[in-house]
Amino acid sequence: MKKIRERRSMSLAQDRTKAQVRVNSSRIATLSGQTEGLGGGGGGSVTLDTVGNPAANKNFTMANKQLKFSYTAPATSDGGFEIEATGGFSGDLVHIHQHTGNPGAVDLLHLECDDADVTPIRVSSSGATHKFTGAALDVGTQKITSVVDPTENQHAATKKYVDDNAGGTPTKEFWVHPHLVSATAARVKVGQFLAYDLSSTEECHFQFKVPADFTSITSANVIIIAEGTETIQADIVISAVAAGEDFDANDSSNADQTKVTTASDITEWDISAMFPTTAANDYIGITFASDTTSVDVIGLVFKYA
């Protein structure tokens, strides 16, 4: 009887100094020492390197709990938590699966940085391509930056690349026909172009309404064909008037303006700098009075932003 009691006492003493770590009723390690609480409470602490490799696949099940690892100044350049794999394997190395249960609008993986110079995620591999597969990528109204110019049909393109190679914002411009004022000026055909042939003191007019989406004038080119290689001269008066204003409330008079031309060439004479203050929906009237012996006026191209 005494020996039986001694054996039972020894067994109890051993039970107090050894404990088993079990997950889903399977033992994964044996810990030595007082282990009540596994890291506090009534006994000593247990370090992670005390836990050995499990003999088979194990599942760790938690309900309504949080598993948290807190690091202060991780010891290595590789970071505080690292997963390494060697050898052949199939499937995913890390698989996060949200099963049914309707948790609401939550994040399955949340990377948060308090410091602006920290990169939340970095992808590197020996391969030239990193794949993102599955559902569409939604960046939540954020910008994708530092994108290189595309080289293949399905590559993403930056705004600058599109602007430089596809014209960017569509051009806003329109054509205005001239209206003859001087009775002696002739309407002539120059090649395949119809024009008004203005001699000295003869004039023509342009008039139009500024579009509602107007912000600023880009150019206002009077299109002319000079009969000689010379410097032509004209007096140009422009009115920009809003509805409800006097017809001459906002005039700009520009006398003796000059333009160098080459005989028979189509010439663009930009008069945009001569415009008075102009706003969307203004009514524009332009008088173009020639001070040159002969100049053929085809029309006006108004371009705006």
Image (cartoon, rainbow, N blue to C red):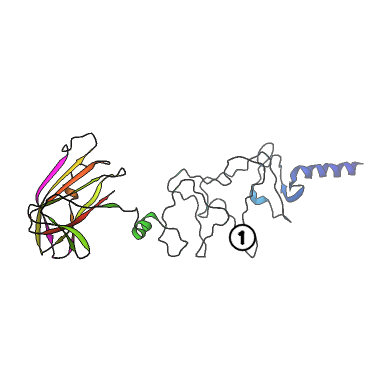
- Position in image of residue 223 (x %, y %): 19, 57
Number of numbered discs overlaid on the protein picture: 1
Residue that appears at 22% across and 64% down: 192
- Position in image of residue 287 (x %, y %): 15, 48
- Quadrant occupied by the N terminus: top right
- Position in image of residue 167 (x %, y %): 34, 57
Residue that appears at 52% across and 62% down: 125
Bin the neighbour count of mark 1 within 10 Å (Cα to Cα): few under 14, some 14-19, many 20 and up: few
Q: Amino acid at mark 1?
A: Ala
Residue that appears at 50% across and 52% down: 121
User: Where is residue 162, by image quadrant?
Assistant: bottom left
- Give the residue at the far top of this rendering: 244
Foreground of the two, 3 or 150: 150
Q: Is residue 288 magenta?
A: no
Q: Is residue 260 magenta?
A: yes
- Magenta stretch, overall SS: strand
Foreground of the two, 45 or 116: 116
Residue 189 falls left or right of residue 145: left
- Position in image of residue 177 (x %, y %): 22, 53
Residue 254 falls left or right of residue 216: left
Foreground of the two, 32 or 235: 235
> Judging from the image, what secondary structure is the residue with disc 1 in?
loop
Return the residue at label 1.
85
User: Where is residue 253, by image quadrant?
Assistant: top left
Residue 180 falls left or right of residue 122: left
User: Where is residue 252, by image quadrant?
Assistant: top left
Q: Which residues are magenta?
A: 249-266
